[in-house]
Image (cartoon, rainbow, N blue to C red):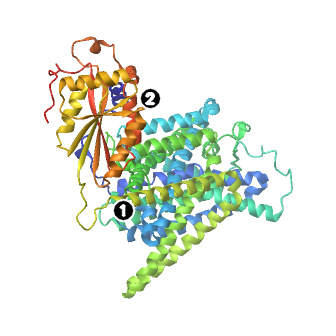
Amino acid sequence: MTRSWAVLKRLLVGEPFASGRGSSLVLSKRYAIPLLAVNPISSIAYAPEQVFLVLGVAGTAAFALSPWTGLAIGAVMVAVIASYRYTVQAYPGGGGDYRVVTANFGPGAGRLAAAALVLDYILTVAVSTAAAVAAVDALVPGLRPWREWLAAAVIALLAAFNLRGLRVSGRVAAAVTVAFVAGVAAIVLTGLVRLATGEDLTAATAGQDAREGAQEWTSAALFLLCARAFAAGSVAVTGIETFTTRVRFFRPPRGRNAAAAITTVGAATVALFIGTVVLAFLTGAQTSANPRSDPDLRYPLLAQLADTVFGSSPAAVWPVMLATAAVLLLAANTAFVGFPQLASVFAEDSLLPRQLHKRGDRLVYSNGILILAVAAALLVVLYGGGAYELIGLYVVGVFLSMVLSHAAMSRHWRRVLDVERDPGRRARAHRARATAVAAVLACAAVLVIVAFTMFRRGGWIAVLIIGGCYLLMRAISTHYAAVRGEIELPKGKPPLPSRSHAIVLASSVNLPLMRMLSYAKAPRPDTITALTVNVDAAASRRLVAEWDRRRIGVPLTVLDSPYREITGPIVDYVKARRRDAPRDVVTVYLPEYVVGLGPQRGRLSRGYFNWSTSLLHNQTTKALHRQLKYEPGVMVCTVPWILGDSTEPPPLRRIPK
């Protein structure tokens, strides 16, 4: 089984990489900007659509509120982008929201930010893959019934790609990002120009919504609906925070170059988002949250706009949608790169199990990749593969971490003002703090709206996941802290055991027993005792007679067991030795029969013994090991005897005293 698993692992993952093969990645702004822009830019594929999905509940008349909603979301984006510009300059070493929050508010708030980031990365993969499948559905509608399973398959392929240690070329990623930006910009600019020249651009789905005018909406209800659309569309802000974790990708001066990149990418994202919303409003485009029940409204918003602006030309629509799917897959892939590294940081800080800090055979954090893939695929399947259904969860995680991060930066700049005396630097710190406060207020407003409007639509699940992650991280941190305190060396000289006692379990005189006695004698313990349990009087008498006849130089102790139990008397005997001398150490030697398939001659090596026959051995040894390992001052040593792969045994001889 071990060999079979190793072969399967090599087929799936590939040959291992040497440790020295890893290299750091430093990019110029020409490549770093398109490469890191994948996450924020990709939100254009689904964020504008969220505004119309929510407003569409009140009918097409409510779409008149979409431009104002888009402008409000743009204002939030500007505040967040401006604050993050100062963050990357204040923390040029990177670290992201978690490091910023921990440094300014302590480990408790840091754990909360870490829990929110875990949900953020999981939803990045889930939402991006679901939106990518939706983009492909626009070209091949026959795939629609299996969208959740296609998204899960895509997640599995991305996980396998990253488990093999493969990386997307920076030039390829930059080309895909530029193609997507060019495609969306072409749609927006062409559509606005055609509208400005008086052409009639009406989306094919305009006017098809039968719900229009079906009921009267009060001003308060419309306000709440508009607030909900504002919160859902604010998912366009996601991705900007990735720059704070990738500052090391830039050449020195890293902080200044990262700030310039954030400004460039942020400006492009805001412009494309607002332009898409305005164009969709002017053309009357519509969409639906339930593609199976509303097939005519199935098209993603970008596909509708491309179809409307370019006249249903496949030569124009196909490249745009393929670029959309590609940039969304790149966004999901960046989460597979970023989350395992972040999980490694959490593990290093004792927030997650230490196994997540270990690199796999291909120099990647394999455990983190697998956890992310399983969690994202599970959410995609449970929510039917729709990005709209997942947005409520996504927004909660994203904006909770942003609120904490910008609040931490506000405190950071307050501390800078307390010690800084240079007028120029104080003026800059005042501007940075005001920007951070504005970002906190904007993000907090979105978070509050989400709490009131999307809590029943999945927001409660996000709160549950974040709360569960926080409690888990707190428990893990507490456990590791207790372990460190317990195993830490004392200031003085550590106490040593007074004496050492060896106990060898004996059931018959044979080669494994002789090996155990030899090993027990090697450390030169103060006393050594062979131990057997009398469950069969005749067998016990034969063992004692053989022991005396062989003249083995180790005393044999026979324990009575009136109820024919083996483990209980042995455990009681060991405990009694410890009670008599609490400062002594007792080592118990147990035999272990290992089933081998080696090249030696004989029936055992020809298949008579295989992995299944291991169930026929070692049951008493396992039971004793389970009970004795919890006894303080007791060491359990198993001495293996490999069946079917042993060399010519030495003659049985008397163990010297």
**Nearer to us in this view, 250 or 642:** 642
Q: Residues within 10 Å of mark 1 (few under 14, many from 20)?
A: few
- Amino acid type for the residue under numbered disc 1: Gly
**Nearer to us in this view, 311 or 465:** 465
The percent position of residue 109, horizontal first and vertical second, equals 50, 66
Whichever of callouts 1 and 2 sits on the residue coming sooner in the sequence is 1
The N terminus lies in quadrant: top left
Q: Residues within 10 Å of mark 2 (few under 14, many from 20)?
A: few
The percent position of residue 634, horizontal first and vertical second, equals 32, 46
Residue 485 is labelled as: 1
Instruction: Tell me what residue is drawn at x 42 percent, y 32 percent.
Output: 561
**Nearer to us in this view, 55 or 569:** 569
Vertical order, 619 against 452 (above or below): above
In this rendering, position of residue 231 left or right of residue 483: right
The percent position of residue 176, horizontal first and vertical second, equals 44, 45
Marks 1/2: CA–CA distance: 43 Å
The C terminus lies in quadrant: top left
> Disc 2 designates what residue?
564
- Amino acid type for the residue under numbered disc 2: Arg
